[in-house]
Image (cartoon, rainbow, N blue to C red):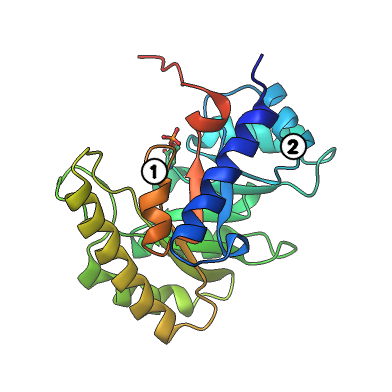
Amino acid sequence: MITIADRLAAAQQRIEQAAQKCARQTKDIQLLAVSKTKPISQIIEAYEAGQRTFGENYVQEGVQKVTELKSRYPDIEWHFIGPLQSNKSRLVAENFDWMHTISRDKIAQRLHEQRPAQMPPLNVCIQINISEENSKSGIDADGMLALAESIAALPNLTLRGLMAIPTDTDDIAQQSREFAALKACYDLLKDRYPKVDTLSMGMSGDLEQAIANGSTMVRIGSAIFGAREYKA
Ligand SMILES: *Cc1c(COP(=O)(O)O)cnc(C)c1O
């Protein structure tokens, strides 16, 4: 039987090979295990295989997992990577270590105000939409710097970088164009904000391309936990 530990090792190996191919160091690319829709038992299995960072998409589900696991596994770092409605921002501010999908000033302000004083600043990424589909969430490249400036003024948030979900396509050329555009945005941001060190892009299907284009954090779900079953 193929275990989660086997799949994690295989994903790590893909990262290592992709890094080697473009003369990057494996240690500069973090693997975020995306555990959305998966039971707590599988998170523990991944933890026992050495995984310490987990990404969740749905607020309620994520908070439930954090609440259940945080006293027994205090060294897990929790990342919120899903769309967030402003009326649920408090739950993210109070439970997560990272938030990847800020694309509006209003959400940034709320997260700052709602971050509990005894917790370290919330690490945040701006979600950029460079995809050629209009349906994706995220701010466009032009709005990025203005949003970065307002986040930088909020002491309870630390701006760590950019996140993106490129177009889901088999067209390698388009994929490359999108990843390269993201990398250019990232370089611009990194130039202005010294704490920026994270380019969150790449998933199970495209991590090699993402790494070739400078990704520092790949978000891997199905390659580790298997396919997801969605409730309609
Ligand atoms: C589900 C999800 C992932 C993981 O996708 P896989 O293709 O299963 O690796 C990564 N990022 C985001 C934002 C997701 O929603």
Q: CA distance from mark 2 to mark 1?
A: 25 Å
Q: Report the residue marked by disc 2.
A: 47
Q: Report the residue marked by disc 1.
A: 83
| Residue 84: quarter of image | top left
- At which x and y percent is residue 93? 58, 53
Q: Are marks 2 and 1 in contact (CB under 8 Å)?
A: no
- At which x and y percent is residue 148? 38, 74
Q: Earlier in the sequence, mark 2 or mark 1?
A: 2
Task: Looking at the picture, tell me which residue is in the foreground, 139 or 203.
Answer: 203
Crowd tier of the residue under label 2, counting other residues whose Cα lies within 10 Å: few below 14, some 14–19, many 20 or above: some
Please name the residue shown 51% across and 69% down the image. Answer: 160
Label 2 or label 1, whichever lies nearer to me, is 2
The yes-or-no answer for disc 1 within 8 Å of ligand 1 is: no
Crowd tier of the residue under label 1, counting other residues whose Cα lies within 10 Å: few below 14, some 14–19, many 20 or above: some
Please name the residue shown 24% across and 50% down the image. Answer: 175
- At which x and y percent is residue 146? 30, 76
| Residue type highlighted by circle 2 | Tyr
**Which residue is outermost to the right?**
72
